[in-house]
Image: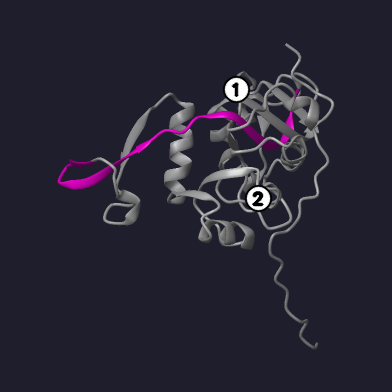
Amino acid sequence: MKKLHDDAVAALDGVLFDGMTIMAGGFGLCGIPENLILALRDSGVKDLTVISNNAGVDDFGLGLLLQTRQIKKMISSYVGENKEFERQYLSGELELEFNPQGTLAERCRAGGAGIPGFYTKTGVGTIIADGKEHKEFGGETYILETGLVADLSIVKAWKGDEQGNLIFRKTARNFNPMMATAGKVTVAEVEELAPLGSLDPDCIHTPGIFVQRLIKGEHEKRIEQRTIRERENA
């Protein structure tokens, strides 16, 4: 099966539908699938449930889909850098399911591994635990969290080959590997396209069996926050 496509629009062709659930890798603006997000915006698909650590910033990343009101619900762990996210949530325009960050990562990993649920101590005694099953193990209380799966996972990798084997780079790995396993269809964009057989098998983070389509993209790699200080006089 030919997995490599010419661009993001072609890679998403026939996959999108209104009301679908999408997992989007990345942390802040680090390791986000920039090209695929733009293609989602331009497609006009709507009423999306998006599972992602956060929603980028107001004018980049998933924030672009908030601007166009294409997202109905976010399943996230952090919203602090996006004013439009905050505004839509507080005004009741956007549904939000908050997760502790580790819980969100484990819910994605569990979904990809075929695990329907797991117990964790994180969130016990807080609003996170409201309405969830509680159970004791070894005298400690745990809550039941469910695994997450998506109609589509979009991820971004450093290197990949035409079979979809992926290598992520440093902190840009973040949520990408677990989300790649939890999509019914996974589309990846890579910075570098490597010849088949050139990737060291021991260095592959996501085997190609999990990836149905991929593209080689051009990436802006915008910095979310830049902090500088004045140079001291010599």
Camera-near label (1 vs 2) is 2
How would you rate the neighbour count of disc 2 (Cα within 10 Å): few for under 14, some for 14-19, many for 20 or more?
Answer: many
Q: Evaluate if marks 1 and 2 touch, with contact meaning CB atoms under 8 Å apart.
A: no
The answer for how far apart the CA atoms under marks 1 and 2 are is 28 Å
Check the image and report above or below for 10 versus 142: above
Locate residue 48, reporting x and y percent. Answer: 59, 38
Q: Quadrant of the C terminus?
A: bottom right
Q: Is residue 64 left or right of residue 19?
A: right
Count all numbered tags in the image, as a single digit. Answer: 2
* Residue lying at the far bottom of the rendered structure: 233
Q: Secondary structure at mark 1?
A: helix
First reached walking from the N terminus: tag 1 or tag 2: 2
Q: What residue is at 44 percent from the left and 39 percent from the top?
A: 106
- Tag of residue 21: none
How would you rate the neighbour count of disc 1 (Cα within 10 Å): few for under 14, some for 14-19, many for 20 or more?
Answer: many
Q: What residue is at 83 percent from the left and 41 percent from the top?
A: 218
Locate residue 169, reporting x and y percent. Answer: 67, 42
Q: What residue is at 73 percent from the left and 56 percent from the top?
A: 59
Chief secondary structure of the magenta portion: strand
Magenta residues (range) = 134-161
Q: Amino acid at mark 2?
A: Leu
User: Is residue 59 shown to the viewer in this render?
Assistant: yes
Q: Is residue 42 left or right of residue 115?
A: right
Residue designated by label 2: 66
Check the image and report above or below for 85 versus 177: below
* Residue lying at the far front of the rendered structure: 92
- Tag of residue 210: 1
Q: Secondary structure at mark 2?
A: helix
Locate residue 115, reporting x and y percent. Answer: 39, 27
